[in-house]
Image: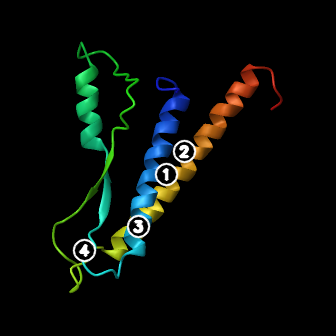
Amino acid sequence: MFATTPLGAIETSLNRSMTEQNAISKNIANVDTPGYKAQTVVFDDALQGALQAHRTEPGHIPFSDSSDTGYQTVTDNSGTIQNNGNNVDIDHEMSQLSRNQFLYQTLTRAAADQFQRFNTVLGGTQ
């Protein structure tokens, strides 16, 4: 909707953070499920490929109005942490949860600040 605006970037980042939150929550909920394999959200590699694909000149700033989110949830089938075939590392997941919650809070503050700017520009109260 706002793909090339600061609010659009915040919206995209909030959606990504929520997707990551869902994957982390699912991993934590299944920490004792036999054979469960952890899920992660892959973002940076997919984003870099998309950015390079849309540039016509190396100096151009890449913008895209594609509906592609630039990230995907993947299952980590490598290794096991527990004897039951589960590979969820609870310490890692709790660390990721904390990091993601901080990111989400920061993004919501940025969105609120952006809406406050809109309100100020439109002559609203401060």
Q: Are marks 1 and 2 in contact (CB under 8 Å)?
A: yes
Crowd tier of the residue under label 2, counting other residues whose Cα lies within 10 Å: few below 14, some 14–19, many 20 or above: some
- For residue 39, above or below residue 123: below
Q: Quadrant of residue 37?
A: bottom left
| Real-space CA distance between mark 3 and mark 2, rounded to the nearest whole angstrom | 22 Å
Q: Amino acid at mark 4?
A: Asn
Residue 20 in the image, given as x and y percentages of width and height = 41, 55
Observer-side mark, 2 or 4, equals: 4
Residue 90, position in %: x, y? 36, 75
Residue 28: % across, % down: 41, 72
SS at circle 4: loop
Furthest-left residue in this view: 79
Report the amino acid beneath label 1: Leu
- Looking at the image, tell me whether mark 2 or mark 4 is earlier in sequence order: 4
How far is mark 3 from mark 1, CA to CA? 19 Å
The reply to whether callout 2 and callout 4 are in contact (CB within 8 Å) is no
Quadrant of the rendered image containing residue 57: top left
The residue wearing badge 3 is: 26
Closer to the chain start, of discs 3 and 1, is: 3
Q: Is residue 43 left or right of residue 52?
A: right
Find disc 1 in the rendering and name its residue. 103
Q: Viewer-nearest of labels 3 and 2? A: 3
Q: Are marks 3 and 4 in contact (CB under 8 Å)?
A: no
Q: Residues within 10 Å of mark 3 (few under 14, many from 20)?
A: few
- Secondary structure beneath disc 1? helix
- Mark 4, residue position: 87
Which image quarter holds the C terminus?
Answer: top right
Q: Which mark is residue 107?
A: 2
